[in-house]
Image: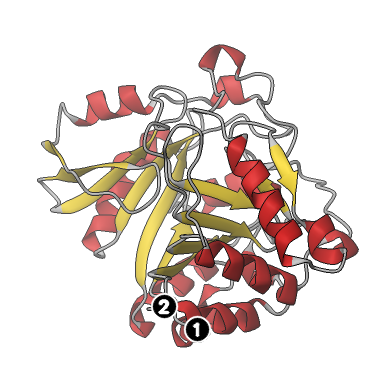
Amino acid sequence: MKPLIDPFGRAITYLRVSVTDRCDLRCIYCMSERMRFLPRTELLSIEELDRLCTTFIQRGVRRLRFTGGEPLVRKGFLDLLHSVRRHLGEGLDEITVTTNGVQLAEFAAPLFAAGVRRVNVSVDSIDRETFARIARRDRLPQVLQGIEAAVATGLKVKINTVALKHDNAHEIPELVKWAHARGHDITLIETMPLGEIDEDRTDQFLSLTRVREDMQSYWRLTNLPDRTGGPARYVRVEETGGRLGFITPLTHNFCEGCSRVRLTCTGRLYLCLGHETSVDLRTPLRAGGDEDAIQAAIDAAIALRPKGHDFQIERLSKPATERHMSVTGG
């Protein structure tokens, strides 16, 4: 089948798939304390997710990342992984998972058995009290146990940390040293204006450009050409020997080489994290599942792909999109 090429000549080779909007944490930058999740009937079945993943692989997608919400709370998720692993080496290069780590100790070995070799784990603090405040749940011990289990199983772990001015800004150097001491890459992420939350994102916004400038006063940072398929730009911290990534949607646009699209758990294909433009794939999938209709819907979506996102610091107090990150997938 013909590859997926957007109007700006960028090939789509990376699909991020949200398997559920549900999560067992309530992180302050992601959702409200009393988050209302979607009815289960609106979610794609495991078989429907498998079919759409297969279709995208046939059209040139070489990387699949499964996200949520929290993907490990989705019933049947391991069945989905075992099914799509048949494409590894047959068009698909890699299957990865993003998780909050709460249930990772239980799932590390099954993930490895299902063909996963890399996981991203969200860790916004290694101080138990701070972690509990950010996540609204006291789960840091479980997360740390999950990371240890992942490493013991053979999974490569990358740490993701959302930078928050009033919660973990002071802790970022310690987080970097902690991750590097254990052989993990770590990526810092600016907070993004996705969905209504209980907090004021303007008040919590921390410029990673400023963070990097501060780091250069006490560390030597060497720019690296490395890319892992996502938007992070990497440096090596010479003093620790580890790799540090920066995802800076608000202080530096990373769209020029974007190869990613996102499939939600309800079957909507989003062409950009920072735009509402999307196309419904669930309807043609369930209306007889005609392959031509599904392919036409995907082609129509790719033709609408914007050049870049619409995140702006000046508009941070109002969400750029109505949907939460947990719906779109990280």
Residue drawn where x is 39% and y is 32% of the image: 254
Instruction: Report the side of 198 relative to 258 (left or right).
Output: right
Residue that carries the numbered disc 2 in the rendered image:
90
User: In the image, what residue type sits under mark 1?
Assistant: Arg
Q: Is residue 198 visible to the viewer in this orientation of the structure?
A: yes
Instruction: Report the side of 38 relative to 203 (left or right).
Output: right
Residue that carries the numbered disc 1 in the rendered image:
86
Eyeballing the image, is 45 above or below 257? Answer: below
Residue mark closest to the camera, 2 vs 1? 2
User: In the image, what residue type sits under mark 2?
Assistant: Glu
Q: Nearer the viewer, residue 143 or 259?
A: 259
**Residue 224 location, quadrant:** top left
**Residue 78 location, quadrant:** bottom right
Which secondary structure, mark 1? helix
Task: Tell me the crowding category of disc 1: few under 14, some 14 to 19, or many 20 or more residues within 10 angstroms, Cα based.
Answer: some
Residue drawn where x is 44% and y is 60% of the image: 120
